[in-house]
Image (cartoon, coloured by chain):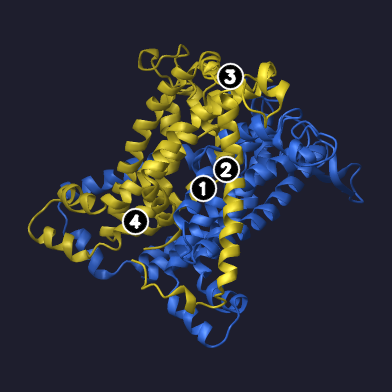
Chain colours: A yellow, B blue
Amino acid sequence: MRAPTIDPRRMPGYHRGRRVALQVGLTAIAVSWLVPVVSAFYASFRSYRGDSLKNGVFSLPERLSFDNYVDAWNRGNIGRAFGNTLFILVPALILTLFFASLVAFACTRFSWRFNVFFLVLFTAGNLMPQQVAFQPLFQIYKRIPWPDILSDTNTGYLLGTKISVVLIHVAFQTGFCAFVLSNYMKTIPKEITEAALVDGASVSRQYFQIILPLTRPALAALGTLLFTWLYNDFFWGSVLLTQADQRPVTSSILVLNGQYTTDYNLIAAASVMIALPTIAVFIALQKHFVGGLTLGSNKG
Amino acid sequence: MSSDTTTRPVTAAPPAGRRKYRVLSGGDRLWLKFAVGVPAALHIGLVWIPSILTAILSFASWDNLRPISTVEAVGFRNYWQILTIFDINLFPALFNNLVLIVWLFVCSAGGMFFAYLLDKNIRGSRIYQSVFYLPVVLSSAVVGFIWKSVMFSKDQGLLNKVIPGASVDYLGDSSKMFEFQLPFMDFSLGLSKNFFAILVAMAWRHIGYIMILYLAGLKAVDPSLREAASIDGCTEWQAFRQVVFPALKPINVVVAVITIIEALRAFDIIATLGTQRGTEVIGTLVVSSLTGEGGGRTGIGSAYGMLLFLLCIGFIIYYLINNFKNTDAT
């Protein structure tokens, strides 16, 4: 992909001394960039009142332990919250990618009256501030009956169930993903599906056996990006799920934000626990993550 | 805009393509209708219809705990009220949004600068990139919590340890760092200390995000352009200003729109860190007038929501025109 690299010494403003200065400067900035994460990590293993507060944050620890983790896990009910996150994340991720690829397929491989209109609608919807849609959506959910047997709530309505959050995630994120995937699918030569059409392949077969496999790199990149976005969602989880025991892990930290918690090391431990899955995915799939973000801004 | 988008598909669709749709069998057509119809119904039903309802409710008065039949049309009263009775909420929030836009633009410039430095094939570029990306994968809420626990607290916060002088309760102190008074207001506007703290935490996340976008953009800039500039005797600044920056125009547009919209719809990090006065933005005003202690004022909340929408829509349209104009051409 990358254009042939040119010897950096032939670039404007090349200077050996400057390069050394640049390395030093960048290292200093990078180290300072890590300070919040590293110090939260460090603090999370120390007792707040017994250690950090008494000896200062820069001191060596008296004792390192997982006490804060255990405490945060229990008080924040984080085990259950992780379960809720999985319950929301997995269906939302799969459905979003499936729907978005369908829309992108139909809008790019076939020309019909409103295909660009639909893409514009989806893209615009995704850019809309979530707060604008929130109140009526809340009221609509409140009025849609939903048997308790299909959720573990007891209200009888869709509001407050994890499914309601899955639906809004799919509705919102399909917009962005359809936009990105349609840009990607446009680069697949028309002749491929035309040949299949001549051979008598049905539209669904063209989608499942030709376009979907060819779109796999974009789906992987988007999937990684969506994973972090859905996992990190705070807004919908906290405004739609009024019962705290239904909340996914990112919104559940609000519980620990109460007045009674001035134990900052406990908060640090909770933050580290919640951050771990996304950091793990990021380390394992950094290429896809970056690819996903840039797919959205670079056309074609 | 609407006429623009609805007429375009007709002209954009090549006759050959139209014919192609017609050759499809009935079953295939039905399949395609479902393929677009189901996601579109979900998207329109849960995003667009609620947004339109917000527009309608902004002209009504309603306590959202009572039945729909109690909705009462009140004309522009909600808008009048947020401008007069609630002006002490609205204008500081608008001012904070404005500060946020300016601030995030500065951060975007910082992200571009980092990307430019890292694009120079320096040693260890990958490691630096990973470090700057790291905050981008964290949730805004987690970012808020991390900063709250180790950076901002009054007794232990690293900022208080590093910055000399009396210790500041960064998240609790709503006193203003600077303030000014407009002639028609009986209160002053300014940047409060707790909002400044939030700005710092947001910068940490935003810079890395923008850097990713610019790194991809810079990779697409033909290196021979820069080489030519060098041969012509450009200084580095001249080469950047006259050659590289103009070549980045598509990315610049995307970044500018992303920056503005992110600044306007900011919510998460402010909701986790800004529990005190002085940190309101429009995005949090919408939610606080609808839920929680001050909740139930549906009309007011919807009017705030519409204000947010009106502030964003121009930029959204600009982005869409810019995007779909180019994709149509290819």
B92 lies left or right of A212: right
Would you say the residues marked 3 and 1 are in contact, meaning their CB atoms lie under 8 Å apart?
Answer: no
Residue at horizontal 65 percent and vertical 24 percent from the top = A264
Q: Nearer the viewer, residue B60 or B306?
A: B306
| B277 relative to A260 in the view: left or right | right
> SS for tag 4?
helix
Report in which chain the residue with disc 1 lies.
B
Judging by the rendered image, the residue that carries numbered circle 3 is A63
The first of marks 4 and 2 along the sequence is 2
Whole-number angstrom distance, CA of label 3 to CA of label 1: 29 Å
Quadrant of the image occupied by residue A4: bottom left
The front one of A8 and B90 is A8
Q: Which tag is nearer the camera, tag 4 or tag 2?
A: 2
Nearer the observer: mark 4 or 3; the answer is 3
The disc labelled 1 sits on which kind of residue?
Val
- Residues packed near mark 3 inside 10 Å, few (<14), some (14 to 19) or many (20 plus): few
User: Where does label 2 land, which residue?
Assistant: A34
Q: Are marks 2 and 1 in contact (CB under 8 Å)?
A: yes
Give the amino acid type for the residue marked by disc 3 in the picture.
Arg
Tell which tag, 2 or 3, sits nearer the viewer. 3
Percent position of residue A252, x then y:
54, 23
Q: Marks 2/1: CA distance?
A: 7 Å
Q: CA distance from mark 1 to mark 4?
A: 31 Å
Element at label 2: helix
* Residue B74 in picture, x, y percent from top left: 71, 36
Asked whether B35 or A258 is in front, the reply is A258
Q: Nearer the viewer, mark 3 or mark 1?
A: 3
Residue tagged by mark 4?
A182
Looking at the picture, which amino acid does disc 4 mark?
Answer: Ser
